[in-house]
Image (cartoon, rainbow, N blue to C red):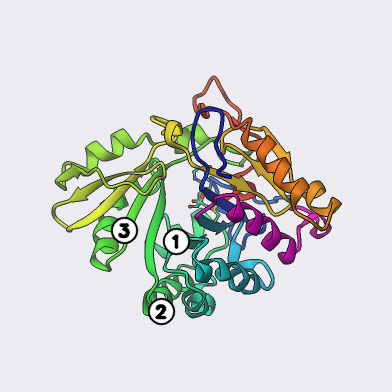
Amino acid sequence: MDMIDPFGRTISYLRVSVTDRCDFRCTYCMAEDMAFLPKKDLLSLEELDRLCTVFIEKGVRKLRLTGGEPLVRKNIMHLVRQISRHLESGALEELTLTTNGSQLSRFAAELADCGVKRINVSLDTLGPEKFRQITRWGNLDKVMDGIDAAQAAGLKVKLNAVALKDFNDAELPEMLRWAHGRGMELTVIETMPMGEIDADRTDQYLPLSLLRAALERQFTLTDTPYKTGGPARYVHVAETGGRLGFITPMTHNFCESCNRVRLTCTGTLYMCLGQEDAADLRAPLRASEGNELVADAIDEAIGRKPKGHDFIIDRRTNRPSVSRHMSVTGG
Ligand code: SAM
């Protein structure tokens, strides 16, 4: 039985945040002194696999692991290997992951061996010092090694950069040339008001309409009908021959075509990235060895998936639209 929400949208995409922990502290994502979930609250890898399997049986065709940083969860490759059996059986079309790249040189080959074909790497700058500044703890060399390892293992790499006013806007043309020169797509994202951070989001927020206008002074951008089922809209860049994506949750959301739900590492299901409403799947999962209770809880949750979100960043609305950080539900 397909999962169809009250607005007729079929849910076929699951994002799973396998940990809320991360080895970076990106300033727009987390506060420096984050309180993380106690380990005892986490689902085990076996429980995560069981939940993913129920979703796949209910019609999920694409599954993305995220976090926190998914590759810092202990024994994460065990989960990847387990889920990959659904790729082999054909029940799952795609297994992928969003990562900051710091651990990729260790895991790229094994990911490819498990049937992962493409990954998203988050990278906001090519400057080592700026990289340290924005991630607080990150080392750009390690990420670059990770990207090299991923490409060497045959993984398709897409870069995601959050567009940050007066931080990386001037650098994005160079990043675009660099990414396309290495055969990687680049997608830029508007910063979203999720969770308390130390910085003021109004200072960081850059509407992508402004960025696009600036890029058009150097590049010939042509809208393309290409879509991946997600919120990105793509242009072709004549000068590089590559594709550039724009994700605009602030200036224009694409909730009407949303096909996804998000599961956290504690078994909480969020039906929308930008709303607080959630369903607990851990209790029904643990209440019985069979999957009927959890399947019913999923149906009940999909039955109240909201129409969409309305993020606001301005000086009057000086608080996050949702209280949880992006690291809880993942990107
Ligand atoms: N650690 C992994 C990574 O870096 O890709 C996965 C989790 S991270 C939360 C996923 C994505 O969310 C990253 O691309 C990050 O830049 C983005 N992100 C985090 N906070 C955000 C915010 N407030 N607005 C927009 N994007 C955000």
Q: Which residues are magenta?
A: 36-61
> Which one is in front, 75 or 129?
75
- What residue is disc 2 on? 153
Label 2 CA crowd tier, 10 Å (few <14, some 14–19, many 20+): some
Q: Quadrant of the N terminus?
A: top right
For residue 277, what is the image quadrant?
A: top right
For residue 72, what is the image quadrant?
A: bottom right
Secondary structure found at label 1: strand
Query: How far apart in space, not on screen, are marks 1 and 2 (Cα)?
Result: 15 Å
Label 3 CA crowd tier, 10 Å (few <14, some 14–19, many 20+): some
Asked whether the beta carbons under mark 1 and mark 2 sit within 8 Å of each other, the answer is no
Secondary structure found at label 2: loop
- What residue is disc 1 on? 121
Q: Position of residue 271 (x, y in %)?
A: 60, 38
Marker disc for residue 203: none
Asked whether the beta carbons under mark 3 and mark 1 sit within 8 Å of each other, the answer is no
Asked whether the beta carbons under mark 3 and mark 2 sit within 8 Å of each other, the answer is no
Label 1 CA crowd tier, 10 Å (few <14, some 14–19, many 20+): many
Query: Which is nearer the N-term, disc 3 or disc 1?
Result: 1
Q: Residue at x 85, y 51 (%)?
A: 287
Give the residue type that dot 3 points to. Answer: Glu
Q: Residue at x 59, y 30 (%)?
A: 321
Q: Is residue 30 visible?
A: no
Secondary structure found at label 3: strand
Query: Which is nearer the N-term, disc 3 or disc 2?
Result: 2
- What residue is disc 3 on? 185
Give the residue type that dot 1 points to. Answer: Val
Q: Is residue 306 visible?
A: yes
Q: Position of residue 156 (x, y in %)?
A: 37, 67
